[in-house]
Image (cartoon, grey):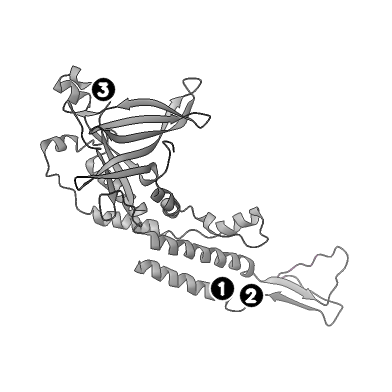
């Protein structure tokens, strides 16, 4: 096992999270199967004819609007009021932060928040300097895809979080000051002899891992005796993975899109009448014009000129199915 080992529940739910991300971002063409014998170019035209009717994304935005229709009230300590306007040290207010958490939970059913401290010895600074330099605790959201492993332990009947492994991306200068690459690292949070510890690992080009740093964060000059990481789920603040609230709608939304693709495909080939002539062989290099200003004559009295048009209820059936699925999404 290595630092990038994934929890079994993580691996079991990764495809569900991807489906939800794809639907919310309207990236759904990969969920449409190719027709038999269809080339890649034909398939691209096939799936790109209709616009995706993204009921899931609109529902997500509506739910967020309902949740935050009233302004948040902060009734906690004065210390929290100080950081209300910049809880992440990236100019995110507490309300912005809460909206981001709610959006993640509505989308994929889970996220996590780490409360961290700058890795600087604050004992050498005065209280005013610490405040001026923002050397204080801050919060950071981790998406469920970046929480790759976790473990709980029970001691004296108390269940507590004993391990969290977070996958992160970071930028580093490569070659010259203007060339920036993106790398992957893993932040391991655990408890050692009752003390909270952070370790940082990065991956080398040969896929091995390098141990880069080890920290024992403190609060008010004292060791922290717990992991300051909180899971946010649909119904509880635990690591248990729950079904995304909009999963059923997303699945119907994809099925709706597949029907839309078939409808547009059928309409593309049948909407315009096709001119046909039977019983007439024509002259060499003869061009027959069609239009009200042209008059057609044929030597063969049995020859016929007509338009081949689509008939039947095939496309109407697809339209009825689409309407039914729109009603289902409305119910969901």
Decide if residue 210 is in sight here: yes
According to the picture, the residue beneath numbered tag 3 turns out to be: 120
Q: Which residues are magenta?
A: 286-293
User: Would residue 101 appear left or right of 77 to someone viewing this image?
Assistant: right
Q: Which corner quadrant holds the C terminus? A: bottom left
Q: Residue at x 38, y 56 (%)?
A: 57
Helix, strand or loop at label 1? It is helix
**Residue at the top extreme of this rendering:** 124
- Residue at left offset 40%, top offset 71%: 327
Numbered badge on residue 315: 1
Which marked residue is nearer to the observer: mark 2 or mark 3?
A: 3
For the stretch drawn in magenta, what is the main secondary structure? loop
**How many C-alpha atoms fall within 10 Å of the one at disc 2: few (<14), some, or many (≥20)?**
some
Q: In the rendered image of this protein, does residue 50 appear above or below residue 133?
A: below
Where is residue 41? Give x, y as percent: 64, 53
**Tag 3's secondary structure?**
loop
Locate residue 199, reporting x and y percent: 34, 30
Q: Residues within 10 Å of mark 1 (few under 14, many from 20)?
A: some
The answer to whether residue 287 is magenta is: yes
Spot the residue most to the front.
156
Gap in Å between the C-alphas at discs 2 and 3?
74 Å
Counting from the top left corner in percent of width and height, residue 141 is at 31, 41
Q: Are marks 1 and 2 in contact (CB under 8 Å)?
A: yes
Q: In front: 68, or 296?
A: 68
**Could you tell me which quadrant the N terminus lies in?**
top left
The residue indicated by pointer 2 is: 310
- Residue 202 x, y percent position in the rendering: 43, 30
As drawn, 81 above or below 29:
above
Q: Nearer the viewer, mark 1 or mark 3?
A: 3
């Amino acid at each position: 096992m290595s630092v990038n080992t994934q929890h079994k529940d993580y691996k079991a739910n990764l495809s569900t999270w991807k489906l939800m991300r794809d639907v919310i971002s309207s990236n759904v063409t990969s969920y449409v199967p190719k027709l038999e014998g269809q080339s890649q170019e034909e398939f691209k035209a096939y799936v790109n004819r209709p616009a995706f009717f993204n009921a899931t994304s609109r529902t997500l935005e509506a739910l967020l609007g309902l949740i935050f229709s009233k302004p948040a009230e902060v009734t906690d300590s004065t210390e929290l009021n100080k950081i209300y306007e910049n809880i992440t040290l990236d100019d995110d207010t507490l309300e912005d932060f809460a909206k981001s958490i709610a959006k993640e939970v509505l989308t994929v059913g889970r996220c996590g928040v780490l409360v961290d401290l700058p890795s600087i010895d604050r004992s050498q600074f005065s209280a005013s300097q610490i405040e001026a330099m923002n050397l204080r605790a801050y919060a950071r959201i981790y998406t469920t895809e970046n929480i790759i492993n976790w473990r709980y332990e029970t001691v004296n009947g108390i269940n507590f979080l004993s391990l969290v492994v977070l996958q992160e991306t970071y930028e580093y200068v490569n070659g010259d000051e203007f060339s920036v690459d993106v790398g992957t690292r893993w932040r391991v949070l655990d408890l050692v002899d009752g003390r909270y510890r952070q370790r940082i690992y990065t991956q080398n080009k040969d896929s091995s891992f390098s141990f880069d740093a080890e920290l024992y964060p403190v609060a008010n000059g004292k060791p922290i005796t717990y992991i300051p990481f909180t899971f946010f789920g649909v119904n509880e603040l635990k690591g248990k993975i729950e079904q995304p609230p909009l999963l059923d709608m997303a699945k119907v939304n994809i099925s709706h899109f597949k029907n839309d693709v078939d409808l547009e495909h059928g309409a593309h080939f049948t909407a315009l009448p096709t001119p046909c002539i039977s019983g007439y062989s024509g002259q060499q290099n003869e061009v027959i014009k069609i239009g009200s200003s042209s008059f057609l004559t044929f030597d063969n009295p049995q020859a016929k000129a007509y338009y081949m048009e689509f008939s039947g209820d095939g496309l109407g059936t697809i339209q009825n199915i689409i309407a039914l699925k729109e009603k289902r999404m409305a119910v969901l």
